Amino acid sequence: MFGLRILVAFLIPDVPGPVRLAIEREQYLQKQAFEGTIDAHEDFTLTDDDIKDAVRQLLGSSKKKA
């Protein structure tokens, strides 16, 4: 019974795949920013147009078209 418990604990991850991938991506981007190979502020800053487009998409998908 103890062996089965260990096997199940090993097979089922504690962190879901998308969350693990997001964590690894953040660590990679952080490493790149600290090494100076990318300018994190310029590469990952949203412009006003990007924000407006995202809001339009969110509001457009939640409203029913009359």
Image (cartoon, rainbow, N blue to C red):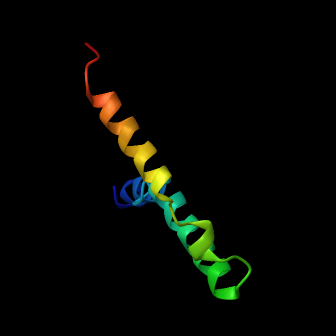
Residue under the image location 29 percent in, 16 percent down = 65
Res 53 → quadrant: top left
Residue 48 locus on image (x, y percent) = 45, 57
Residue 22 locus on image (x, y percent) = 51, 60
Q: Where 57 sits versus 66, above or below?
A: below
As drawn, the residue found furthest toward the bottom would be 35
- Residue 39 vs residue 66, the one in the foreground: 66
- Residue 52 vs residue 24, the one in the foreground: 52
Res 64 → quadrant: top left
Q: Where 32 sits versus 62, above or below?
A: below
Residue under the image location 54 percent in, 69 percent down = 26
Q: Where 36 sits versus 29, above or below?
A: below
As drawn, the residue found furthest toward the right would be 37
Q: How many marks?
A: 0
- Residue 23 vs residue 8, the one in the foreground: 23
Q: Quadrant of the C terminus?
A: top left
Q: Quadrant of the N terminus?
A: bottom left
In the picture provided, is 32 more to the left or to the right than 24?
right
Residue 41 locus on image (x, y percent) = 57, 75
As drawn, the residue found furthest toward the top would be 66
In the picture provided, is 2 more to the left or to the right than 30?
left
